[in-house]
Amino acid sequence: MTYHNVGRTVDDAAGEAYDKVAKLLASAIRRPLDRRSRPYGNPRAVPFTFSEIKPRVHRDGSTPANKKAPPRSEGPHFDFSFSGIKTAVLRYVEAHHLRASIEARRDALSADPGITPKSAAVTKLCDQQTLDLIASFQYAVVGNLQRQTFAAAESLGARSLIVSGGVAANTELRPASRPKLTAAVSPSPFHRSPSPPTTPP
């Protein structure tokens, strides 16, 4: 089997952006967004956007190599970049003076070892503005992943598509993407790796 790389991250991957924003906000991203636990924030409260990816150029005119990605293949490319939205979240925090609430959340986590960033209790420590910020961040990231994936599938005439990796299990990406992917390509685009067979004792 052969394959061609038609899209890659030019900086942070989506999962890295999630982890860094979670660390910045002193909260696990997934917990406040879990629909099964409680309603979360407004995903359109903060209008994050993704600008065109422009390659960095050295002073001598050469383009630095991207050590995170495999070599380029010929044909169209559908790259990703998530460092910008990470910076946008930081600027929003600073512009809206959210540092105090973030530090209060850190102090609460330090004071009670039983509470971890992934605990349901952390959601209660997030004010509505923080919940809106988290929801808007995820809405933007998921939307970008969808746009690039659908554009690649359409451009290449893909008849099937497999979504894998850690972010593929995201509670927003899966339900938001399944109807569009099902209509465009494979009837079951989300696949889990089969569990290894168990050996009888």
Image (cartoon, helix red, strand yellow):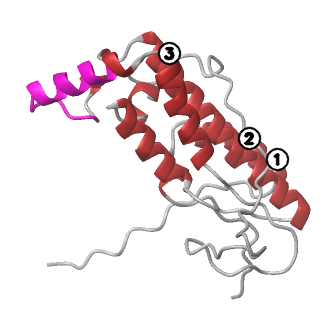
What separation in Å lies between label 1 and label 3 (alpha carbons)? 41 Å
- Residue 198 x/y as whole percent: 28, 74
Q: Amino acid at mark 1?
A: Ala
For mark 1, give the secondary structure: helix
Helix, strand or loop for disc 2: helix
Pointer 1 and pointer 2: residues touching (CB < 8 Å)?
A: yes
The correct choice, above or below, for 122 with respect to 195 in the image is: above
Where is residue 199? Give x, y as percent: 24, 79
Residue 84 against residue 30 in the figure, above or below:
below
Q: Amino acid at mark 3?
A: His
Callout 1 crowding tier (Cα within 10 Å): few <14, some 14–19, many ≥20: few
Labels 2 and 3: the sequence-earlier one: 3
Extreme residue in the top direction: 128
Q: Earlier in the sequence, mark 1 or mark 3?
A: 3
- In the image, residue 105 sits, relative to residue 14, either above or below, namely above
Q: Residue at x 67, y 56 (%)?
A: 189
| Frontmost residue, 121 versus 102 | 102
| Quadrant hosting residue 160 | bottom right
In the drawing, what numbered circle is on residue 96?
A: 3
Q: State the extent of the magenta-drawn residues as a range.
A: 101-117
Query: Which secondary structure type mostly characterizes the magenta part of the structure?
Result: helix
**Looking at the rendering, in which quadrant would you find the N terminus?**
bottom right
Q: Quadrant of the C terminus?
A: bottom left
* Secondary structure at numbered mark 3: loop
How many discs mark residues in the rendered view?
3
Q: Disc 1 versus disc 2: distance between alpha carbons?
A: 6 Å
Image quarter of residue 200: bottom left
- Which residue is disc 1 drawn over? 183
Q: Nearer the viewer, residue 185 or 130?
A: 130
